[in-house]
Amino acid sequence: MNNVARSVGSAADKRMKKLFAPAAVVVAAMFAYGLVLIADAPTESTMGLVQKIFYFHVPSWFAMFAAAFTCGIASLFVLIRGRKSADRVALAAAELAVVFGLIGLITGPLWGRKAWGVYWQWDAKLTSALVMWLIFVAYLLLRRYGGAGSEKLSAVVAIFGMANVPFVYWSVNLWRTVHPLTSVVPTLPPVMRGTFWWCVVMFIGLYVLLLAARVRLEKRRAELDALFLAIED
Amino acid sequence: MSVRRVKRLVGTVLSTAALLAGLSAFPATASGQQPPEPPEGFVAAGDLPAKEELPAAPFVIGAYAVAWVLVFGYLWSIWQRLGRVERELADVSRRVEAGGRR
């Protein structure tokens, strides 16, 4: 019983705690400088000021895709090897996929209202993005209310969600929609392109940071459960 | 008919005519204040009055505000949940150690 109690605050935990604060400072500094870069970036000729939403909208989807891949790959490990640690990563990544997807789903319509005249269009890109986001919402609902053994079923849902990522990304090239093509980024002027990639890196940094914090929460919960079980024994 | 009566009659006719002329001129003035007829066909975006165009700033500010609120809200929720679990862990660990000593 005491061994379980002593496992609270392992070496890996301490290392992560030590790294977390400097990493958080770096990401915060990147966001602060990112806002300066966005303000300095030239205004787009046809859309004007509203195009600046691009610097948060697209990177938030990149972070969502990263979360979807993390969740899907970790779920593969859950299904094949039955690893508890992979399950914790999958759950944390699914939550982040929903958060970053929600940022994308709110900022996109705000941009669309000004650029297209409507908040929403049921075209291939927007609809498939919404469906992918709903898959990860379904994953979380399944984990929350699915009961014992739901981690296997939700792992399958996560893999299905991950498989959607390339489809969502390429849908705009396969079907002509109101949404800009994926070829927009390479054609950006260097100043706008630099700002865009900076924002992508800072969003991925934020994603990694939040993932680490969320995985730690799951790990501590698992330790608490183990401690309760040890008391019962 | 006396001269005075003729003069009064002429005066009445003239003043009535002046009043009618004034009234008939009024609708013309009023119609000048009405808005111009809407143009037929398409109008170039550059010719639209400023109030017809959607301002971009509220959308940009709204989008950035939503992103910040969601990120900080999520961070706060992790902080809260982690704090709760850490408190419970400390409490249970204390109980386990107290039980071990006995």
Image (cartoon, coloured by chain):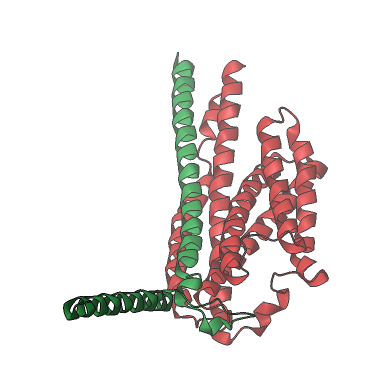
Chain colours: A red, B green
Picture quadrant where residue B50 is located: bottom left
One can see residue A77 in this view = no
Residue visible at 52% across and 32% down?
A: A6
Q: Where residue A125 appears, x then y in whole percent?
A: 74, 63
**Location of residue B61 with respect to A145 vertically, above or below:** below
In the figure, is residue B3 to the left or right of A8? left
Q: Quadrant of the N terminus of chain A?
A: top right
Q: Where residue A114 appears, x then y in whole percent?
A: 56, 69
Q: How many marks?
A: 0
Residue visible at 43% across and 75% down?
A: B31
The residue at the far front in this view is B1
In this view, the residue in front, A218 or A226, is A218
One can see residue A124 in this view = yes
Q: Where residue A201 appears, x then y in whole percent?
A: 57, 69
In this view, the residue in front, B62 or B19, is B19
Q: Where residue B48 appears, x then y in whole percent?
A: 51, 79
**Location of residue A41 with respect to A122 vertically, above or below:** below
**Location of residue B43 with respect to A111 vertically, above or below:** below
In the figure, is residue B74 to the left or right of B3? right
The residue at the far left in this view is B4
